[in-house]
Image (cartoon, grey):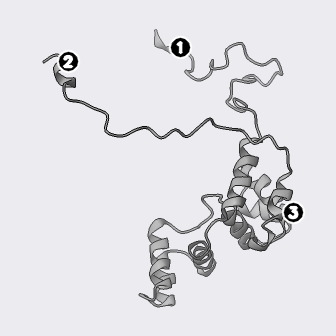
Amino acid sequence: MTLSEIAAGVEVTSRQRDRGVALADDTETPLVDRLSAHADALPCTPEATATLVDAYTAGRSVGDAAREAGVSPMTAAKALHRCGVAGVCPLSPTGRDVVRDWLAGRTSRSEAVELAGGDEADFALATYVETHDPVEPLAEAVDAQVAGSAPLGDGLGADDPLGDGLGADDPLGDALGSTDGLR
């Protein structure tokens, strides 16, 4: 069977959606100013939320980010969730299903807390996550902040592999590792 026989009768039945050109947000508007327009949707001040986002997206824990922002860890997790930051719910998908069952009235609260696999605080935060959606303008502001916080290619490990400030000749040099042991 030849390729032309395999391709016979193949046709395009739908069109690809043109999503346009990806844009970087270069408005240089501080995150706190972007968050201020939606302050009523946040569980803490826009200033504290901006501090939380900066600390959390830099790799710090929710607890550390909360201390830096001067809020409780629960408030920090709620603010990050409202800003569209993923991963702040402490329960597994099955635990979240149990919370949804409790919210729908299919199980008692005490049974749901036990089945969810966390403690009371975890259950309370998961309930908040299930009953409060991220706010789209806040999520867009945070995404723009995170996307614009580092130029493309920074932090890939090849920028300054030796840490000597001299950079690297081959930007992908450390991507494949050494070939010394291949002989």
Q: Residue at x 64, y 78 (%)?
A: 121
Distance from disc 3 to disc 2, alpha carbons, whole Å, reads 63 Å
**Picture quarter containing residue 39?**
bottom right
Q: Secondary structure at mark 3?
A: helix
Residue 124 spot, x, y in % from top left: 61, 79
Q: Amino acid at mark 3?
A: Glu
According to the image, label 3 marks what residue?
A: 47
Residue found at the far left of this picture: 1
Residue 67 spot, x, y in % from top left: 82, 64
According to the image, label 1 marks what residue?
A: 179
According to the image, label 2 marks what residue?
A: 4
**Residue in front for this viewpoint, 142 or 9:** 9
Q: Amino acid at mark 2?
A: Ser
Distance from disc 3 to disc 1, alpha carbons, whole Å, reads 49 Å
Q: Secondary structure at mark 1?
A: loop
Residue 68 spot, x, y in % from top left: 85, 61
Distance from disc 2 to disc 1, alpha carbons, whole Å, reads 42 Å
Q: Amino acid at mark 1?
A: Thr
The tag earlier along the polypeptide, 3 or 2, is 2
Answer few, some or many: residues within 10 Å of disc 3's Cα (few below 14, many 20 plus, some between 14 and 19): some
The N terminus lies in which quarter of the figure? top left
Of marks 3 and 2, the one in the foreground: 2
